[in-house]
Amino acid sequence: MSLELSVQGQRGSFRLQVEATLQPRGVTVLFGPSGAGKSSLLRMVAGLDHCDGVISFADQTWLSAEMELAPWQRPIGMLFQQPTLFRHLTVQGNLDYVARRRQSPVGQQAQVIEQTGIGPLLARRVEGLSGGESQRVALARALLGAPQLLLLDEPLSALDEAHKRELLDLIALAARSVPVLYVTHNMDELLRLADQVWLMERGRIIAQGPASQELSRLDGSLAQRADATALLAGLVADYAREDHLQGITVGDATLWLPVEQQLVAGESVRLRIAARDVSLCLSAPDDSSILNILPARVVGLREVGPGQCLVQLALAGQCILARISGRSARQLSLFPGADVYAQIKAVALV
Amino acid sequence: MLSEGDWLALGVSIQLALLTTVILMVLCTPLAWWLARRRLPGQALLEAMLALPLVLPPSVLGFYLLIGLGPNGPGGWLAEVFAQRSLAFTFTGLVIGSVLYSLPFVLQPLKNAFSAIDSQQLDMAAVAGARPRDRFFSLVLPQCREGYASAAILGFAHTLGEFGVVLMIGGSLSGETRVASVALYEHVEAGDYVSAHRLAAVLLGLSLLLLWGLFRWQRRRPNLGAMP
């Protein structure tokens, strides 16, 4: 079940033109600066704003030159920046509103209430809910009726940090059973959720691909950012109890990171490594305090900003980035194909 | 307390006010929605025309209605719809006059209530599976309850207080077009101050009761469609 888009739309002087294909699984993050047209595109996919072109989903046509399905005919669930709960209804009333109209399967409501933890809120009026509670109810409402695609428009922007994490976990959980198109301009959210990335600028999608690939592309706009970060897929391995360090294997290498509690061995996890936390040396230092020093091969170099150099490295079959000074790059005579050691000062689970 | 004729007049007033209110609620719902949610050329002029009864002397409206609804007036064809020779001096004529006269008092609260609806609520309802008609009944109507209550009470009370228009096109036929306010006027004309006092007191009490009820209710519910 994949979503195919080939749409054009005009809002005043702003022109949106998008060709894209959504992967049928996981989270696709639609990323870009404010005003790039992300929300507009999402509203077009939902059918809330009109556009020209073709939208098809699985074997269903949502939009073509001849026809257009209305939002209530598209099998979608949606979250806006604001929870937008129906303010004349209780929490339960909000759920029923969707369940009745979207023909929610029997038993689904109980399961969604359980999943989002909103059981204690059901009888409450929506005006009395906190921001975090409201957005959880909104997510539960969006999941009812078994949507085949979730459209999330910066759903965390009105929440504080603690509630952001909570909702991110719930969204990640939901994404296991339904594809998600997630709009944000926040790098942390991208790193936490993205399987795929669509990069949007000035009404166009300028790049699309797997998140790990788009993040570490030297010529991509994500790598040019000061907070450029690579994503690695790993498996939980041994736990060094006396040091409170958790081993994660990435290919044939093992990275150690401090954790509060041991993780389940064999589980797959994602690691994030910021480019500015990686330094390079030509031989393996044996007198460094840095835990993770791994052999890597230079894939490419690119100057970014005055005196700064971004190095793309192959590490155990995956890619990371190192942001070093131009002088260091010259002194080490780095070139594509060179073998180096990557000193990774910080690595974190996402 | 009141004479039989006065009770009859009060009955006509209430009947007229009820019918006018019902007609205006139905008529003003789409009109107010259109004015609140769309922006079209000529809208300001249209809104000014619809608000005219707020400022116009009622006798001006009554005068035009008298001319317009007469057998030779441009509205004469309307009489045939109601199988009458002329609508002037009939209850139907009064209803038409009252509808025009009280229109802004129903239109404004509805328009304010509709304007206050967040368009994202409507978008969300559409995504939740609700078609436009469904959205109106399941979302707009319940969220605009206060606006509808204001509109109904103001429309009713204002029609009850109508005098100038009725005087022009009513004709004061007992049981048909003689409303309470005109009956009061006739008592004063005839020097029957006792009857005039009684009827005036009833009208005063009734109007106060209606408005008191409205304001009490508005105080309890803070976010109301405002008064015109």
Image (tube, coloured by chain):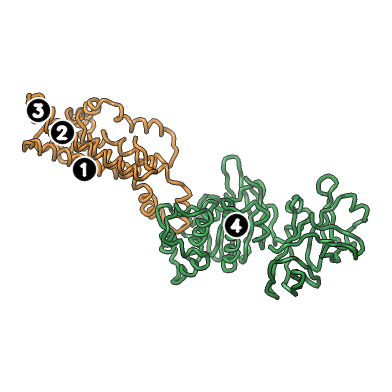
Question: Amino acid under label 4?
Answer: Ala
Quadrant (top left/top right/bottom left/bottom right) for the N terminus of chain A: bottom right
Going 38% across and 53% down the picture, which residue do you hit?
Answer: B133
Q: Nearer the viewer, mark 1 or mark 3?
A: 3
Q: Secondary structure at mark 2?
A: helix
Q: Position of residue A278 (x, y in %)?
A: 81, 58
User: Which of the chains is orange?
Assistant: B
Q: Are marks 2 and 3 in contact (CB under 8 Å)?
A: no
Between residues B19 and A250, which one lies in front from this camera angle? Answer: A250
Residue B62 placement, left or right of A68? left
State the image quarter where residue A347 is shown.
Answer: bottom right
Is residue A27 visible to the viewer in this orientation of the structure? yes
Residue A3 falls in image quadrant? bottom right
The residue sitting at 92% across, 63% down in the picture is: A283
Quadrant, the C terminus of chain A: bottom right
Eye-nearest disc, 2 or 3: 2
Residue at point 19%, 38% (across, down): B206
* Residue B187 badge: 3
User: Which circle's residue, 2 or 3, is located before the other in the chain?
Assistant: 3
Percent of width and height locating residue A63: 53, 56
Going from N to C along the chain, the mark reached first, 1 or 3, is 1
